[in-house]
Amino acid sequence: MQIRTVTDDFIKDLLMKGTREDGRGMGAYRPINIATGTIPNAEGSATVDMGHTKVLCGVKIGVGEPMPDKPKDGNIITSAELLPLASPHYDIGPPTPEAIEFARVVDRGIRAAKVIPTEKMFIEEEKVWEVYIDLYVLNYDGNLFDAGTMSAVAAIMSARMPKYEGEKVIREGSLGKFETGNVISSCTYAKIGNSIVLDPDGNEEASMDARITIANDENYVRAMQKGAGGSFTFKETEELIEKTFEKSKELRGILKKAVGE
Amino acid sequence: MSGGENQELIINGKRLDGRMPDELRPIKIEANVLHNADGSAYIEWGNNKIIAGVYGPKEALPKHISDPERAIIKCRYQMAPFSSLEEHGRSGPNRRSIEISKVTKEVFENVVMLDHFPGSEIDIFVEVLQGDGGTRTAGITAAAVALATSGIPMRDLPFAVSAGKVGDTIILDLNKIEDNSSDADMPVAVSPRTNTVLLLQMDGELTRQDINTAFSMVQKAGTYISKLQREAIKAPYEKIKDKYNK
């Protein structure tokens, strides 16, 4: 793995000089672009470009049976596909632990913050609305979690709500907007040597010792996930949470602008 | 499968979306849309939205599948679970997508110069993000552009389009509604330089005369589709040229 070592040295060398590959600051995102309604057949959809990372989220809304432990609540089903066309390191096959973690972290933030108000999704006995959130990674260059959360939230915020009439789901015609309960975003940081950077790209993720994702709304941290072998001190973690609250104002602003709110 | 129930697909000589029988849906192709892939293309063909990516040539793995004489092609066609206006689909391969992956692979085995890369594999991925009939043909058309932009040597740039029949009328480029209730559907992929057929599937009922009419329609449409493919391949370089000419 000669090439990996060279990249690793290069990244660490830059960080020691206080800079990054693209000259970004330690706490800066790459350019973010959100396009909503990219898949009109899906009830909600959004494509997020975060630098070269490109994630498409499609939201389908249907009718199903409630979970036995929550007979009055709607369902949320989140999955992620690390498509083989997104990176030379992704292969065809069943979901990898990486893909499962990605889907579950995005799901937890959305669920905990009640972006989807499941308690309002009861139709009748044994029938509730269910929301499928599919994350499609089209190009990988680090930080899937933030791009994924952003695409999912943008897709939900811009979704249309089907109607249920006479045992049938009506997906076309004049439909209202899906009613969202909250807006969240996440911030992911990578620890590389002694530096901590926001929004790691692919090379930085390959060189990182540890990763932490913090998802929050205006008032609360809603989900967190630490990843990779290294560690963060308590102090570092608290500082990062503080930074995340500051940064997330910007991210929520981008999201609201993208969905025209 | 009778003409009677399909009369409504063509009214006053026009199709439900206003097209003439031999008219294509609007097609837009963009090359080099993915940063990591060695070649890629995005196609919008009517309401179809499809992205194709190519990786390789690279070492064929697992080792026992490699061919010491030539490269092998791996191909996966897949529909996103959110790609249709109906219910959420199931992810993962099904019998239909496995067959389409196979016939798509066979199209490119014909035109890619596989003997240049013994022991290697070339991966072609076709992801249908939104489907509205004719996804395999649009996918092949996009994959050809993706392969060309990857720089892998090819003998030709194949295109694909489907033809079919509604009542007594042969129609080109069936959309989903037409595909579901037509009397016949026939996707065709063509190598235009040699004017040979690389993919041909059909179901329904067509006379010899019908097939002849359909084939002419496909070839005529191919001139236009090929032109769009070439323009898409050139476009990124035209941009660079413009930049330097300024």
Image (spheres, rainbow, N blue to C red):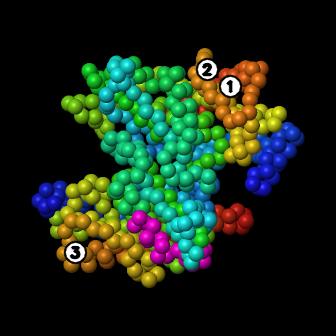
Q: Nearer the viewer, mark 1 or mark 2?
A: 2
Residue denoted by label 2: A221
Can residue A47 be seen in the rendering of this structure? no
Could you tell me residue B117's position as x and y percent? 60, 74
Residue denoted by label 1: A244
In which image quadrant can residue A221 be found?
top right
Please state which amino acid type lies under the numbered disc 1.
Thr
Outermost residue on the left side: it is B4
Q: Is residue B217 left or right of residue B83?
A: left
Label ID, residue B210: 3
Q: Chain of mark 3?
A: B
Q: Chain of mark 2?
A: A
Could you tell me residue A130's position as x and y percent? 37, 30
- Could you tell me how far apart the alpha carbons at marks 2 and 3 are, in whole angstroms? 65 Å
The mark that comes first in sequence, 1 or 2, is 2
The main secondary structure of the magenta stretch is helix
Q: Check whether the beta carbons of the residues at disc 2 and disc 3 lie within 8 A of each other.
A: no
Circles 2 and 3 on the same chain: no
Q: Which residues are magenta?
A: B102-118
- Could you tell me how far apart the alpha carbons at marks 1 and 2 are, in whole angstroms? 9 Å
